[in-house]
Structures are given as C-alpha cells and as structure tokens.
Amino acid sequence: MPPGSYETNISSFSSFFQGWLQRQEQFLNEIIIAQNTLNESQEGVIRDLIFRVLAHYQEYYEEKSRMTHRNVFYMFSPAWFTPLEKSFFWIAGFKPGLAFSLVMNSVNDLNENQVERINRLRVETRVEEKNLMDELAKIQESVAAPPLMRLAQQFGIELPSDREIREVDENIETLRSAMEIVVTDADRLRTRTAENVVGILNPLQGLRFLIAVAQLQLRIRMIGMQREAERHQMDTSDGW
C-alpha cells in the first residue's frame, strides 16, 4: 500500500460512516412515523420500508468489508467508534445475539410459534458465535508461535536474516487472511441473524424491532460522544 493511502482509506471510511449515521437517524424517524400511522392493511408499504432499512445496513457491511480487506487489524479498534461503542464489540462489531434481547424487549405480542422459532434461532446463533470465537482464539494463539516469537526474542540482540524476515512477512500475511475470514464470517452472522429475526416477525413487529436496534445504536453513539467531549474538556482544563 503506497504511503499515505492507508490514512486516506481511514478518512474515507470515517466520512462514509458519518453520512451513514445521518441516514440511520432519518430511517429511524421514518420507521417511528410508520409505526404510528400505518396498519396491517398497508403491509406492502411496511415491507418496502423494512427492505430499505435492511439495505441500509447491508451498505454499511459492504463498505466495512472493503475496509477490512485493506487492513483487518484496524477493524478491531477503529478510530470512527468511541471507546464506549468499542466496549460492546465482539469480533469487530456488535454481538449477533444482542438481536434476541432487543426483539424480546421491543415486541410483546409474539405468538407461541414465533417464540419457538426465535428460541431455536437463538441456540443456532449461539453455537455459531462459539465456533467463531474458537477460531479467533486459534488464530491469536498462532501469533506467539515461531518464527514470530523467535524473531521477537532476537530483536535488539542481533539483526534478523532476510530468510527470517520473509518468514515473518509470510506469517503476518497468513494471520491477516485468517483474521479477515473471521471478521467476514462474523459480519455475515450479524446480518443473517437480523434478517432471520425480521423474517419471523410480522411487518408491524419488524418495525418495532428495527426501531429498538437503531435507538440502541444511536444512543450508545450519543453517550459515547458526550463522554469523549467531557474527557477532552477535562484534558484541556488540566493543561492550563
């Protein structure tokens, strides 16, 4: 990657994310209005709105996928998220299972069949979450394996040979590829879980679920930004 291009990519994604969040707020307002004004007879209108909201999320994950391919390591602590937002991270994003807490708290008229299907989906998602965490743990363990560890031990004592440097480069590339696959699979699980939950709900229930998702995300964002502003103000005051 040419010098400066990485910083350009970060700036580009950060700008995209800011615009995406603005559209997220607009969609939230549109969903709330639809929930308050539409009824079951307008199912087609509601489904079209749900489709557009899900497409909005898909746009984020497609752009994130491109950024992940450029530098997957950065996605585990991206600068465009606040520390509070990052505290909710699970493999470079929100945990898929969070969807089940949101749907149970936001939709209070689920029938028995819906509850059974959601519980079954919850179990399946939990298994996939565990599999991804196991895979991530294996990858992290590989970081301490030779030749990376051997070279780290030698660093500062003697210069590494060209062969050792090539071995490290090869291992870093292998690590990068493995991490990219895990993040991609985690994002697919996130989107698939949300889509499956929406598929179980009726259109009006789907609106309530999507409202809960957007409100949580934007609220965490708002609180995180406020905390960062307060911290910056305190740091500035301490400097006087």
Image (tube, rainbow, N blue to C red):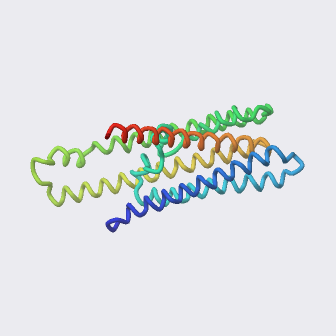
Please indicate whether residue 73 sits to the left or right of residue 203 in the image.
Answer: left
Quadrant in which the C terminus is drawn: top left
Measured from the top left, where is residue 59 in percent x and y? Answer: 60, 58
Q: Residue furthest front?
A: 240
Please indicate whether residue 126 sits to the left or right of residue 143 in the image.
Answer: right
Of residue 111 and residue 71, the one placed in the foreground of this image is 71
Residue 131 visible? The answer is no
What residue sits 55% from the left and 59% below the top? 62
Of residue 228 and residue 111, the one placed in the foreground of this image is 228
Measured from the top left, where is residue 80 in percent x and y? Answer: 47, 51
Above or below, 166 against 202 in this view is below
Please indicate whether residue 165 sits to the left or right of residue 215 in the image.
Answer: left
Quadrant in which the N terminus is drawn: bottom left
What residue sits 69% from the left and 36% below the top? 103
* Number of disc labels: 0
**Image quadrant where residue 165 sits:** bottom left
Q: Residue furthest right?
A: 41
Above or below, 130 against 69 in this view is above
Measured from the top left, where is residue 160 in percent x and y? Answer: 14, 54
Above or below, 211 against 123 in this view is below
Above or below, 19 against 231 in this view is below
Measured from the top left, where is residue 64 in percent x and y? Answer: 51, 56
What residue sits 42% from the left and 46% below the top? 77
